[in-house]
Amino acid sequence: MYGALIVEDQVSPDVDHDITAIIDDWRLQQDGQFVDDFSNQHDMGHEGRLGNFARAIFTHKTVQQGDRIRLRLINAATARVFPLRLDGLKGKVVALDGMALDAPSKLSQVTLAPAQRVDVIADVVDVPQIVFSSRQGDYFLGEIAVDGYNSTRQPSKIGALPQPNLSKPDLNTPHRLTLDMQGGAMGGRHYGTDIWAFNDVSGLPPKPFAVFRSGETAKISLVNSTAFPHGIHLHGQHFFELDDDGLLGVFRDTTLVDAGQSRDIACVFDNPGRWLLHCHMLGHQAAGMRTWIEVV
Ligand SMILES: [Cu+2]
């Protein structure tokens, strides 16, 4: 993301407002000051540095009932995965991690790992509210007030956004790799030098995890051998999640892999350069869970 987030005068023609919501959490003392324990090893070895106070911060304070809005949610938290419910809105998910879906999908619960984004186009049917469905119950993150009624907007279908120009992955590619996530509390042994490791290496190795020829497809199995979820983020390109049958799923740049689970991805490496590949729970990254790839 570059530049200003607030783009109120650049509204897409088919919506009344383009709204961004930054979702974040903070660790606060009773008096509202930040808790000053940023390099806490216990956090790094567990879920990461979770806050005890969370909010959604919107670029808009009000909408009208009946408005059609485009709402972009960004999980800017250091470590927290947010399962979210959007109340007061009836619509569709139209993009993930900034990439348009070819067919908008049902708007139900949305889960965002750190760094993940989702775009929704929806009609305002009641006060739009974002609720974090936490293990302890619903946690209110924020709302946009409803002020007035939009009587000019006519009901219409929510279509797909303009499609990105994507290179088709070669699913028969011989280039297959495994990225094994290791370490942390209650994790198994590994040979890395820090709390976390990828394939027995902690931190950035002198040689890349892999080198790809520009335009080449590779399939990577992301294997979570740890006791915690990880949001794995690749810089410089997006990738397809593959389903259990190996078919193309959603196209994004950060994928959440739950503890003990694995996910295969297929990526056309078409952006030359040296790129980080890391866990976006930043305490995990700082404590070893990072590597890099090169596209030549
Ligand atoms: Cu992680």
Image (spheres, rainbow, N blue to C red):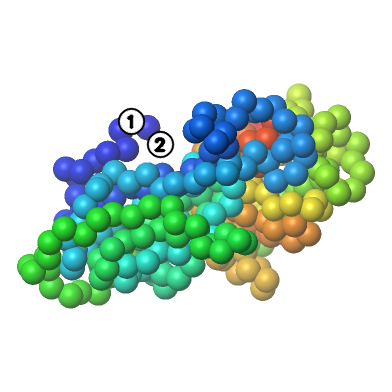
Q: Are marks 1 and 2 in contact (CB under 8 Å)?
A: yes
- State the SS at label 2: loop
The image shows residue 47 at horizontal and vertical percentages of 70, 46
Q: Taking 236 as reference, is 227 above or below it?
A: below
Q: Is residue 191 left or right of residue 89?
A: right
Q: Which mark is residue 1?
A: 2
Q: Is residue 193 visible?
A: yes
Residue, x 59% and y 47% (percent of image)?
A: 80
The image shows residue 182 at horizontal and vertical percentages of 82, 45
Q: Is residue 176 left or right of residue 67?
A: right
Q: Quadrant of residue 3?
A: top left
Which quarter of the rendering shows the N terminus? top left
Amino acid at the residue labelled 1:
Gly
Q: Is residue 51 left or right of residue 193?
A: left
* 72 vs 84, nearest the viewer: 84
The image shows residue 114 at horizontal and vertical percentages of 56, 46
- State the SS at label 1: loop
Q: Which mark is residue 3?
A: 1
* 64 vs 170, nearest the viewer: 64
Disc 1 Cβ-to-ligand 1 distance below 8 Å: no
Residue, x 19% and y 66% (percent of image)?
A: 65
